[in-house]
Image (cartoon, rainbow, N blue to C red):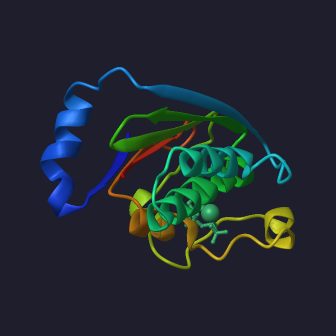
């Protein structure tokens, strides 16, 4: 298995505490992310953003959540056989987890390099494939965890504090 972790230093204790013992979420949302369906992909990110806006989350945090969730959702549609997006919402943070059906990321370090992309012709025609999604998710999240390997599912999960 290949694993990637990025945690913003000031949230290190909170993130470790959260993953050591995830509490019961206040709200849970789940969205399917079908393969190569670029009409559906992005719905989860925008519905989640709209809900959090109604709940009073500030606009900069909303923007970061929308960007990170959108990029991860598009990655599931573009690079995997499809999967699900699950949001766990708490008073002070959102945990978003993407689980797909493979084929996985063979080289995690390479995948995190800005500009690296394995996007096929169809994905590029849809305007994706600049190789900037994962770096953008990292930049906009307080914690990012990726678990994958070749010929296996990928899990991408992120935390953003309100
Ligand atoms: N869920 C996934 N399953 C398999 N491979 C993935 C997944 N997410 C990312 N990757 C791999 O990591 C690479 C880099 O992802 P990243 O999001 O940074 O760029 P991209 O999707 O290729 O282009 P962009 O996001 O700029 O449209 C992808 O090209 C792909 O090889
Ligand atoms: Mg991408």
Confirm whether residue 110 shows in the render. Answer: no
Image point (60%, 51%), residue name: 49
Report whether 2 appears left or right of 88.
Answer: left
Residue 140, percent from left and from top = 43, 65
Tell me what residue is drawn at x 61 percent, y 60 percent.
71
Residue 33 coordinates in the image, percent (x, y): 72, 39
- The number of discs equals 0
Q: Looking at this view, is 41 or 26 the one in front? A: 26
Instruction: Tell me residue 31's x, y (percent).
Output: 68, 34
Residues 71 and 108: in front is 71
Q: Quadrant of the N terminus?
A: top left
Find the residue positioned furthest to the top.
24
Q: Is residue 11 above or below residue 22?
A: below
From the viewer's perspective, is 92 left or right of 106? left
Q: Quadrant of residue 47?
A: top right
Residue furthest out toward the left: 13
Q: Nearer the viewer, residue 147 or 46?
A: 46
Q: Is residue 84 above or below residue 39?
A: above
The image shows residue 81, relative to residue 140, as above or below, that is above
Answer left or right for 103 relative to 107: right
Question: Ligand 1 falls in which quarter?
Answer: bottom right
Look at 68% across and 55% down and name the residue there. Answer: 74
Percent from the top left, x then y, of residue 20?
20, 29
- On the question of residue 58 being in view, the answer is yes
Name the one closer to the observer, 72 or 111.
Answer: 72
């Amino acid at each position: 298995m290949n694993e990637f972790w990025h945690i913003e230093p000031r949230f290190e204790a909170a993130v470790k505490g959260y993953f050591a013992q995830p509490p019961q979420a206040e709200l849970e949302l789940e969205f399917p992310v079908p393969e190569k369906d670029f009409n559906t992909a992005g719905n989860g990110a925008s519905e989640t953003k709209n809900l959090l806006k109604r709940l009073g989350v500030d606009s900069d945090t909303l923007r970061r959540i929308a960007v990170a969730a959108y990029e991860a959702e598009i990655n599931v549609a573009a690079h995997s056989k499809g999967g699900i997006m699950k949001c766990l919402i708490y008073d002070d943070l959102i945990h978003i987890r993407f689980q797909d059906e493979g084929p996985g990321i063979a080289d995690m370090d390479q995948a995190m390099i800005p500009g690296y992309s394995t996007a096929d012709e169809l994905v590029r025609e849809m305007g994706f494939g600049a190789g900037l999604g994962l770096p953008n998710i990292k930049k906009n999240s307080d914690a990012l965890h990726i678990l994958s390997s070749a010929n296996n599912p990928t899990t991408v999960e992120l935390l953003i504090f309100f």
